[in-house]
Image: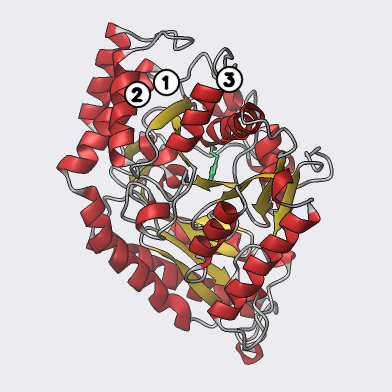
Amino acid sequence: MTFENTAVAQDSHFLHPWHPFDYYKDHGPSFMVEGKGCHLYDENGKAYLDAVGGLWCTNIGMGRQEMADVISEQAVKLCYANPFGNLSSLPAAHLSAKLAELAPKHLGHVYYGGGGSDVLDSAFRIIQYYQNCRSKPQKKHFVARDRAYHGTTYAMASMGGIASNRSTDLDFITETIHHISAPYYYRNAAPGMTEEEYTDSLVKEFTAKIDQLGGPDKVAAFYAEPVMGGGGVIVPPKGYLQRMGRVCKDNDILFVADEVVTGFGRLGHWFASASEFGLEPDIIAVAKGLTSGYQPLGAGLLSDQIWSVISEYGRGRVLTNGYTYSAHTVACAAALKNIEIFERERILAHVMDVGSYFEEQIKTLSDLDIIGDVRGLKFMMGIEFVSNKRTKDLFPESAGIAMRITKASLQRGLIVRPAGHLNIMSPALIMNRADVDFCVRVLRESIEATMSDLRKEGLWSPHGR
Ligand SMILES: Cc1ncc(COP(=O)(O)O)c(C=O)c1O
């Protein structure tokens, strides 16, 4: 299909996610028209290295003919199959078995959604059902963290903890969803505190929250991204996830690992919670890299323990949850091909090599005067800007620091994402070393140019360091 060049007018009918009403009115929509590998191309054919990877998702890279072929073949053969009850499809069955094979051994049962939000939302409902099946109907409180992002269904937006997403113009569930601190050592640890002491304080806060909610009999589950993404690429202090996992196990609280970003290779593993952090979650949610953006699909992996409760104690009941498009045939076929490409091209090993180089090279930017912290792992990195390195003071919102650097980078052919006082990078996992060098060089130039602008505008001075 070719699209006529009337798109700007057409787009005004589209309510975008995070629709910026004023900005949209003034600037209109912005388009990319083609993607190949880790590059995007605009209407004039200008190339950009997409260090955002779409939105943390184009993991195997864009424009692969064999992905298009498998999608086309499946669409012609069986474009849709009703997944309700005992009805199934070959792509759904094969993908479920493949995910069970790749996942930690105890996570052998899979359900599906169209992306991350609805899979995590289904986990919320499955957990309520699980607690009811085992005659623990009082166990209904959920704990999440400040700065968390788990999507935007009503329950998952309520689970979220990014302050700017919790507008007073929107409603949230507050009776059964509660928050504790993010493991944000750079900004929240008391001066002089070691990582271990900081972790102690976070674990204490969690146990105090459980007590405050009425004890373990009242708390159903804890939701956590192994490395927090949209909330600021926050890598937890060593041992934090294992210790939070221990608190969950000791108190019969389920641990939901939101691996929508960290799964499917971003940190060099199929699932990072177990392989990178030694955690044994009860549910893992994946989406994004599961199809590398070629089709919308999310999957939740359930532990054998949850499965045995909902299938044995749940006898005579039906779990009335799922969607018309759960395990969509075309999306499942795309996921299977995506996994085949990961395996054939040894993409996890590539991330261990070039992702480590990316991490190391991005960290070299930390000598710049307005960079307070550079953090992340492999192909998931964030740069936090400060007006003063020593005091860690932030720039005023009105300076729009991250957006300035995004714009400066864009002019130079690089896409990085602004998020509060950070720029975030999550490129396609197939980037090579030359792509990494380009990205780091352009970022350095863009940050230096921005520092010079800020100085000229009287918004910053290097003496404030
Ligand atoms: C960690 C995390 N969880 C859940 C979601 C929601 O996924 P989706 O937008 O596919 O619903 C996202 C999206 O960015 C995410 O980053």
Task: Kindly identify which numbered label has been placed on residue 327.
Answer: 1
Estimate how packed mark 2 is, as few (under 14), some (14 to 19) or many (20 or more) residues with alpha carbons within 10 Å: many
Q: Is residue 435 left or right of residue 168?
A: left
Q: Nearer the viewer, mark 1 or mark 3?
A: 3
Q: Which residue is mark 3?
A: 321
Looking at the image, which is closer to me, 453 or 358? 358
Residue 227 percent location from the top left of the image: 49, 58
Residue 383 percent location from the top left of the image: 51, 68
Asked if residue 42 can be seen in this view, the reply is: no
Query: What's under tag 1, amino acid-wise?
Result: Ala
Query: What's under tag 2, amino acid-wise?
Result: Cys
64 shown above or below 366: above
Q: Residue at x 63, y 92 (%)?
A: 463
Q: What's the image's color scheme?
A: secondary structure
Tell me which label, 2 or 1, sits earlier in the chain: 1
Marks 2 & 3, CB-CB < 8 Å contact: no
Task: Kindly identify which numbered label has been placed on residue 332.
Answer: 2
Residue 114 percent location from the top left of the image: 49, 26
Tell me which label, 1 or 3, sits earlier in the chain: 3
Q: Residue at x 60, y 80 (%)?
A: 197
